[in-house]
Image: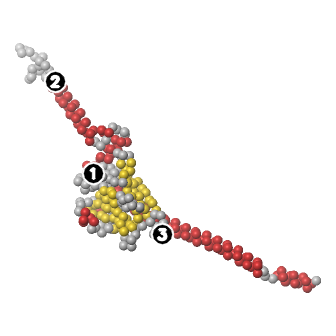
Amino acid sequence: MGAHLSAANQRERGGFTLLEVLVSLGVFIAVMGIVGTSLVATVNGWDRGQRALDELRRGEHVMDQLASALRSTCGGGASTKRGIYAFQLANTDTEPPAAQLSWVTTSPAFLPPGSPLAYGTHRIGLSIETLTDGRPALAVRAWPYLMTDQDEIAALEPGFLAPGVSGFLCRCYDFQTQDWSLEWTSSNALPAIIEITLYVNSATNNAAEPLVLQRLIDMPLGSTNVNNALAITLNLPASMQGGGKGKGKSKSKAKGSKDKQGKGKGSQGNPPGARKGGPPGRGRGG
């Protein structure tokens, strides 16, 4: 009896069986695989989030510079002469779009440090161009606003603001049609509101969809746009919009009223039967 108990105790005090070890090892491997997969997914998600945040910051920085330069636009209305201060816009039907935008400004935005144009009036030109490695980028050129030779302007060396920006779209709001337009044809007025859209590519994954940033920018208004905007907002008649016909009518009416006033004064000063040169009420023999 004692020998039998001793053998049982020895079996109980022995290690796990091979089957138990294999089951435990399988469970451990499964748990570690789940933990490792979750950890890798978490790290990759954090990395993607950081890259997206960097792209957002880069795009927002370009947007801030654009807004600063556009809100400091010169010209518009009576101050625009011979198209020197003209707001120039041309969009493309490509995907993503590649707009070409040019305006006169006093803002030092987009200018390199120490640029002689930073402290005066100059013209800025933005476009999408290709880098030496084949990647698209937002390019900027700056030149004196009185320079009009297109060959000299095209020969200027561009600066690249953001290599990750692959698309650029600009739309103007037209108060006359109450709709957005992809072009601006007026050479003596500025658009009231501009919509800027930037397409920012991923720095590490070219196949990923670009990040789309959009912002509305209120522009300084020329006198023509102010009159049109107020007339349309107040639902004034078409004759009072634009200032052309309304001014002509008001002048003619003013002239007519002036003539009537002149005639009235003449009739009151020289009534029928009155003598010129003497106060009324005195006779000849007085």
Q: In 3D space, how far apart are the residues under numbered discs 1 and 2 (Cα atoms)? A: 48 Å
Which residue in the protein does label 2 denote?
267
Which residue in the protein does label 1 denote?
188
Asked whether, in this view, residue 119 is left or right of residue 270, the answer is right
Name the residue type under label 1. Asn
Name the residue type under label 3. Asn
**Residue at the extreme right:** 1
- Give 157 or 277, whichever is nearer the viewer: 157
Residue occupying image coordinates x 43% and y 64%: 200
Assess disc 3: are there few (<14), some (14-19) or many (≥20) residues with their C-alpha within 10 Å of its C-alpha: few
- Which of discs 2 and 3 lies nearer the camera? The answer is 3
Horizontal and vertical percent for residue 74? 29, 55
- Give 75 or 127, whichever is nearer the viewer: 127
* Secondary-structure class at tag 2: helix
Which residue in the protein does label 3 denote?
205
**How many numbered marks are there?**
3
Image quadrant of residue 45? Answer: bottom right
* Secondary-structure class at tag 3: loop
* Secondary-structure class at tag 1: loop
